[in-house]
Structures are given as C-alpha cells and as structure tokens.
Image: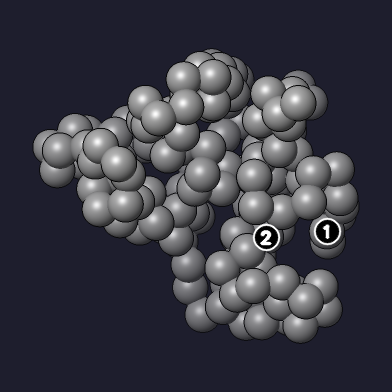
Amino acid sequence: MSGEIVFFDTNTLVYANDGADPAKRVRAREVIREAIITGTGCISTQVLAEFWVTVTKKLKRPLSVELAREQIHLFSAFRIMPVEQTTVLETLRIQERWQLSYWDAQILASALQARASSVYSEDLQDGCIIEGISVTNPFNSLQK
C-alpha cells in the first residue's frame, strides 16, 4: 500500500495508549509508526474528540490530562480531516446506504473525503469494501 492514505478509526489510537491488552498495544503502535514514517496516516476531528474522551474517562487506567493532550499534539503527524457540514451530509448518505451507525458512517465519510484507500478499524467488518475503501482490522491476526 505504498503511498496510499490509511485512515485510522479511534480504537487503534486508543489501544496504542492502553496497557490493558499488551498485544494490541504493540500492534497499534506498529501500524501508527508505519503510517507516520510513510506519511500516509489520516484521522478526523471526530477521532481526536473520541480519543480524548476514551483515554481520559473510559479506560480502566485513564491517561492523565497532560499525557492525553501530548498524544493529541503528536497526532499532528497525521493529516487531520475536519468534520464539516459536507462531511455530515456524506455521513447521512453512507449511513442510509450501508445501514451503519452514524459514527461508523462518519469515519467512512471522512476517509472518503481524504481519498483514503483503507480504514483501520476494529468496529467495521474486516475485509469489506465500503464506498471503494477497504476495511482492515489491524488486530485480526491477534485473535485466535
């Protein structure tokens, strides 16, 4: 996938900062590092917001506000797509067509607007293609 844009769903970024599952933490860091090195990583403002809430409020061992803020600054290595009205309208179209949750559809709408070729997500069906975007669960090889 050389040079092709990879869009990250929130869960991959969260696992990179969560010690509850060491194998997922290592794998998340691998795919994030690869995207940073190749300059192909992309996220949205939705992902930033979900990341913040999850790592500061929902983890068994939440990150400190300072560390979570530092992580968000580090995400500037990714291309960041804003969620605008056009994104919301595209989200509604994708949600209706593919019968997805609003939030999953918004991930795909942002990925589509970024011209991503794939989305790393644990929430969507691994291997499916939605709107021409390939869904990959980067943790699939860890599940037996």
**Residue 137 in view here:** yes
Q: How many marks?
A: 2
Q: In this picture, is 33 found above or below 133? A: above
Q: Left or right of 76: which side holds 42?
A: right
Residue displayed at 83% across by 61% down: 131
Asked if labels 1 and 2 touch by Cβ distance under 8 angstroms, the answer is yes
Could you tell me if residue 42 is visible in this image? no
The x and y percentages for residue 4 are: 73, 33
State the image coordinates of residue 85 (x, y, percent, origin top left): 51, 80
Residue labelled with disc 1: 130
Task: State the image quarter where residue 142 is shown.
Answer: top right
Residue drawn at point x = 56 percent, y = 34 percent: 41
The quarter of the picture where residue 122 lies is top right
Q: Is residue 41 left or right of residue 57?
A: right
Residue 2 percent across, percent down from the top left: 76, 22
Q: Looking at the picture, which amino acid does disc 1 mark?
A: Ile
Secondary structure at badge 2 equals helix
- Please tell me whether residue 123 is drawn above or below residue 11 in the rendered image: below
Which quarter of the image is occupied by the C terminus? top right
| Residue at horizontal 24 percent and vertical 41 percent from the top | 62
Q: Earlier in the sequence, mark 2 or mark 1?
A: 2
Residue occupying the point 39% across, 56% down: 50
Mark 1 residue element = strand
Is 81 displayed left or right of 62 in the figure?
right
Q: What residue is pinned by disc 2?
A: 108
User: What amino acid is at disc 2?
Assistant: Leu
